[in-house]
Image: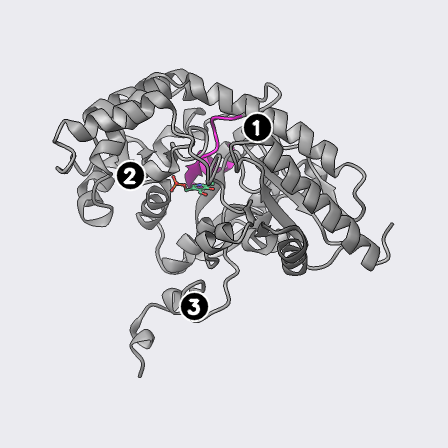
Amino acid sequence: MSVKDLMTPAFQKAEGGLFSKVTKADAGVDIEALLADGFTILSWADPFFPDPSTPEFVLDATIDALKSGVCNHYTSPLGSNELKEVIAEKLREYNGLTVDPKRNILITPGSDSGLFFAMYAFIEQGDEILIPDPCYPNNFQNVETRGGVLVPVPLRAENGFQPVAAEFEARITEKTKMLVLTNPNNPTTTVFTRKNMLELAKMCIEHDLVCVVDQAFEDIIFDGREMVTMAALPGMWERTVTVFSVSKGMGLSGYRVGYIVADDVVMDALYGTAVSVIGAANTAAQKAVVEALRRPGFVQDYAETFDRRRHKIMEILNGVPGIKTWLPESGFLLWIDVSALGSSAEVCDYLFKHAKVSVNDGTAYGVQGKGHIRIVFGCLRDDEKLYDAFRRIAKAFTELAKKKGIY
Ligand SMILES: Cc1ncc(COP(=O)(O)O)c(C=O)c1O
């Protein structure tokens, strides 16, 4: 018997390590080697990667924190009180949530660990979990590693990738325990409407479901759309665990700071187990994030950059044969239907070889991702370098279309 046989079935099946072909979004390629080889990385949802982009005042706050000489020490496993107070203020102003910073917020080392922890606390073997498809791949893996059963619910292009409550409700059984949402959605950038969120909320209440919502992409929303926080809807605070991040809108992914927000009853259990499950977030990073949250004006500059870019890349891709894409509603991701040109893997591979770009295979985001790819247009500091990469992509798509006989 191999020691692997002693692992849980879900861990035995996990791919993306040393011995299997990788299909996961962000893993498996040697990014440093690719950069050295002149590739443009458009597969990491990391603003301005790999260029320097820390706002000056955040950098100063980081250096001051380090020089204070206390950053070698742990902060509380629940997070720094100062940070939790600033977050409570932001939750009140931006999310319509009034919380007690000492009872309802838990700081996590990035939001991935928060998302895992939030789901871990509820999911048992055999529990059925409703998850929109396509969505962030970690949602699938987190369910599976707990022995839960994935119940993907398609988000359809013809509905603007909005979640239709009836489609979720039709899949509910007595084993359904949780609804997981990524709002705005990764990879489609869809900002879920208030009407759809209210219908999903009603469904959660009627069927006694817990709702885990990942709002990592909440900061950058285009065209005046409303960002609706599920936990702020009537009857949802008690049954919603919300996960936030400073990695995306604030572009502070390397700081590894995220936070979970939940009601006292849930938080009582999460606080009780946090120290052994997630440890504590980095002390200097938490101090720097306090300053970033106090002066979030730079996020507006980022939003303007991504707004400008989304229009320009649509212009570059306009008229390219064999593809269909949608103007992003939020953030810095582009979702493209390339099914006329081949499988997602074939198209990613073609772009890799002929346009020297790394993009994401849509199948990592669920069954609905078949024939799709995701491109991160938030990468690189210089707009022109990004547009140059998109021109290479447009050229490669056109060549591929010609090879497939599409004009
Ligand atoms: C939707 C979504 N949620 C959460 C995360 C995790 O971000 P972090 O752990 O950096 O906070 C990501 C990262 O790509 C993401 O795309």
Compute the Cα span from label 3 to label 1: 37 Å
Q: Which residue is mark 2?
A: 108
Q: Is residue 254 magenta?
A: no
Of 95 and 86, nearer the camera is 86
> Which residue in the protein does label 3 denote?
13
Where, by quadrant of the figure, is residue 281 drawn? top left
Residue at the image position 60 percent from the left and 36 percent from the top: 385
In the image, is 262 to the left or to the right of 36?
Answer: left
| Percent of width and height locating residue 276 | 18, 49
Q: Residue at x 53, y 24 (%)?
A: 303
Report the residue marked by disc 1: 306
Q: Relative to residue 388, is residue 304 drawn left or right?
A: left
Amino acid, disc 3: Lys
Amino acid under label 2? Thr
Quadrant of the image for the N terminus? bottom left
* Residue 211 lies in the magenta stretch: yes
State whether residue 234 is above or below residue 240: above
Highlighted range, magenta: 202-220
